[in-house]
Image (tube, rainbow, N blue to C red):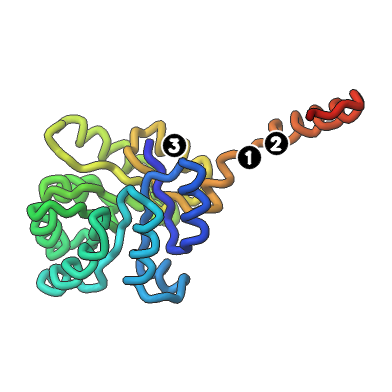
């Protein structure tokens, strides 16, 4: 499974990229607001650090304006994935952009039929929002499983499942088990994947025993 980081913080992105565990980046208007910088600068800086797909979201809601904004965003770098909402106009824009060879991330997916439409429109990525479904008392991970089954039934679909709105390390595990191609994860959750109480306990024991040896290395 590929790891994308869900942030517009260039410092966090650079740290993860240097570790070699980062395959791409997703941003959205809320993350741009949090970064408090012009979106064009943010996306350019990210693309200078990350070779993989970098999702940059249009703000428009109608087809013509989405095309205009997407044209601007994709000129930033070759690895920009234009992010469009899962609406009728968004799907039309998706078809136009993928037809021109651009990557497209169709976002705000909450049902398997929506994901089917996105694949038919040629989406590079479909972003089902797990956490937001969980908030409504619906098992968000079940949606990942349903989309995986549908896409596997039709192997000609080019679309990768990008599990989004992941809020826990268990979400990441479940997404991998469900067969998501990509998980986009907040930096804190990525770093949390390394943690386990038995790792900490074992390390404390090794450190204590090493001190008792009275040795040094080097």
Q: Secondary structure under badge 3? A: helix
Residue 209 position (above or below residue 162):
above
Q: Secondary structure under badge 1? A: loop
In the image shown, does 189 or 206 lie closer to the viewer? 206
Distance between mark 1 and mark 2 Cα atoms: 7 Å
- Which residue is disc 3 drawn over? 174
- Rendered location of residue 189, percent (x, y): 53, 49
Residue drawn 51% across the image and 57% down it: 12
- Which residue is disc 1 drawn over? 195
Residue drawn 87% across the image and 26% down it: 215
Residue drawn 13% across the image and 68% down it: 67
Q: Quadrant of the N terminus?
A: top left
In the image shown, does 152 or 141 lie closer to the viewer? 152
Q: In which quarter of the image is the C terminus?
A: top right
Pointers 1 and 2 in contact (C-beta within 8 Å): yes
Q: Residue furthest front?
A: 218
- Which residue is disc 2 drawn over? 197
Tell me the mark number nearer the camera, choosing from 1 and 3.
Answer: 1
Q: Which of marks 3 and 2 is nearer the N terminus?
A: 3
């Amino acid at each position: 499974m590929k790891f994308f980081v869900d942030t517009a913080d260039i410092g966090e992105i650079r740290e993860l990229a240097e570790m070699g565990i980062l395959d791409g980046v997703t941003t959205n208007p809320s993350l741009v607001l949090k970064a408090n910088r012009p979106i064009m600068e943010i996306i350019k800086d990210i693309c200078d650090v990350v070779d993989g797909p970098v999702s940059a979201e249009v703000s428009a809601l109608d087809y013509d304006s989405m095309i205009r904004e997407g044209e601007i965003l994709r000129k930033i770098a070759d690895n920009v994935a234009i992010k469009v909402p899962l609406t009728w106009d968004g799907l039309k824009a998706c078809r136009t952009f993928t037809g021109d060879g651009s990557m497209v991330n169709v976002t705000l997916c909450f049902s398997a039929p929506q994901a089917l439409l996105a694949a038919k429109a040629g989406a590079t990525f479909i972003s089902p929002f797990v956490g937001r479904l969980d908030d409504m008392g619906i098992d968000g991970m079940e949606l990942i499983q349903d989309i995986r089954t549908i896409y596997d039934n039709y192997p000609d679909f080019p679309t990768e499942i990008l599990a989004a709105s992941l809020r826990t390390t268990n979400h990441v595990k479940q997404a991998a088990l469900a067969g998501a191609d990509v998980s986009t994860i907040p930096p804190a959750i990525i770093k949390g994947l390394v943690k386990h109480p038995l790792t900490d306990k074992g390390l404390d024991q090794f450190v204590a025993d090493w001190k008792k040896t009275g040795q040094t290395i080097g």
